Image: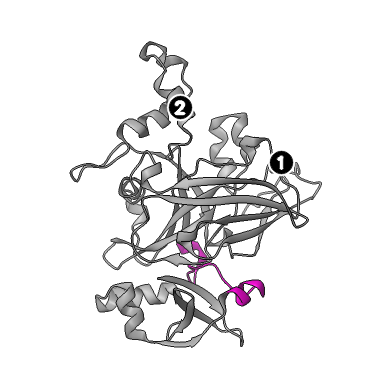
């Protein structure tokens, strides 16, 4: 089953559950966050809570999407309690990349880049086994709920950015219960929007390159993540596709297991604060930037994978301000 957040014809927010082609409003609940809290409060699973709430009117999700009435599939009354984070170097990538890595001689270890060393650590030890965690991955912070863009919305690229590039990923959606236990709501497709030119200058600029908006959805998949995910990432310019490439995800195509990535995020107590929401993105192996594509204002990203329902579309909105080097003034009390 898929769940999403939509504005109905009168502008009221509601939760929509979809099984097959039929999408219906979940009765008596306005947000997926409230639905998750209700399930936690009753001890029910999310599916059982939806059944207990009951289903109401049918919704034409495609039409709502086209009219801009589909919202980000998770939200919080206070956006600062939504944390967007992610991991990198978690996917195996092409067979050629793996072969190249395996052909490296141990004696040439010092010649490997830090990124390749991190990648190899994940391949060799990124899977949890027998209840024990594996090696920790590369980790980054993207921002809070203020940078979470709705499906169909604009992805702002700041005037000081050097690139506005997509990253097609799978994201886990979580809420922290009253005891500080992370609870997964489900999974969604994500566009982990980044500045790859800044990152390429020096890997120590990774943190700067990741402090950008991102988008997830439109729908959350309830249940386990498929082991093998095949999707397509494309860029449209003036209605025409200028770049398109398949991408793979799921544990069959990853060097880390999902539970290992979750462990190394939630092992920090700061990320286990009751009531908080987390959107944690699991990485990618497919980038248009790697193929020499430079995006422009108005380009549209489209990321789709059948296992996640409707495709995720967002438009690039580049800030063309000319004062990008003007110092931000800090006031003194």
Q: Is residue 77 magenta?
A: yes
Q: Residues within 10 Å of mark 1 (few under 14, many from 20)?
A: few
Q: Secondary structure at mark 1?
A: loop
Answer with left or right where residue 144 lies relative to residue 262. Answer: right
* Residue stretch rendered in magenta on the structure: 62-81
Residue occupying the point 57% across, 48% down: 211
Considering only vertical position in the picture, is 64 above or below 212? below
Percent across and percent down for residue 253 are: 40, 42
From the image, which quarter does the C terminus lie in?
A: bottom right
Q: Which mark is residue 195?
A: none
Answer with left or right where residue 288 lies relative to residue 57. Answer: right
Whole-number angstrom distance, CA of label 2 to CA of label 1: 25 Å
Percent across and percent down for residue 290 are: 61, 35
Percent across and percent down for residue 105 are: 39, 14
Regarding residue 107, the answer to whether it shows in the image is yes
Answer with left or right where residue 81 lies relative to residue 267. Answer: right
Regarding residue 115, the answer to whether it shows in the image is no
Residue occupying the point 75% across, 44% down: 324
Residue corresponding to mark 1: 294
Number of marks in the image?
2
Residue occupying the point 52% across, 46% down: 247
Considering only vertical position in the picture, is 106 above or below 219? above
């Amino acid at each position: 089953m898929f769940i999403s957040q939509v504005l109905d014809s009168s502008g009221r927010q509601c939760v929509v559950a979809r099984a097959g082609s039929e999408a219906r409003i979940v009765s008596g609940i306005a947000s997926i966050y409230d639905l998750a809290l209700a399930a936690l409060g009753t001890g029910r699973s999310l599916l059982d809570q939806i059944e207990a709430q009951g289903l109401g009117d049918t919704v034409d999700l495609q039409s709502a999407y086209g009219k801009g009435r589909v919202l980000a599939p998770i939200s919080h009354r206070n956006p600062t309690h939504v944390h967007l984070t992610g991991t990198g170097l978690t996917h195996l990538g092409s067979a050629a990349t793996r072969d190249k890595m395996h052909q490296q001689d141990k004696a040439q270890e010092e010649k490997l880049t830090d990124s390749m060393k991190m990648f190899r650590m994940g391949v060799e030890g990124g899977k949890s086994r027998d209840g024990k965690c594996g090696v920790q991955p590369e980790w980054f912070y993207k921002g809070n709920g203020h940078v979470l863009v709705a499906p169909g919305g604009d992805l702002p690229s700041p005037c000081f950015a050097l690139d506005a590039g997509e990253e097609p990923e799978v994201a886990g959606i979580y809420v922290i219960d009253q005891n500080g236990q992370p609870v997964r709501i489900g999974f969604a497709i994500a566009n982990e929007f980044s500045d790859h030119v800044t990152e390429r200058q020096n890997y120590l600029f990774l943190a700067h390159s990741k402090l950008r908006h991102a988008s997830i959805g439109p729908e959350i998949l309830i249940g386990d993540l498929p082991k093998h995910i095949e999707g397509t990432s494309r860029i449209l310019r003036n209605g025409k596709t200028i770049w398109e490439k398949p991408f793979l995800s799921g544990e069959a195509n990853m060097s880390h297991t999902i539970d290992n990535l979750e462990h190394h995020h939630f092992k920090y107590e700061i990320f286990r604060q009751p009531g908080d929401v987390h959107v944690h993105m699991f990485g990618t192996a497919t980038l248009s930037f790697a193929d020499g594509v430079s995006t422009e204002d108005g380009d549209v990203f489209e990321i789709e994978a059948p296992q996640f329902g409707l495709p995720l579309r967002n438009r690039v909105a580049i800030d063309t301000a000319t004062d990008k080097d003007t110092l931000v003034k800090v006031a003194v009390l």
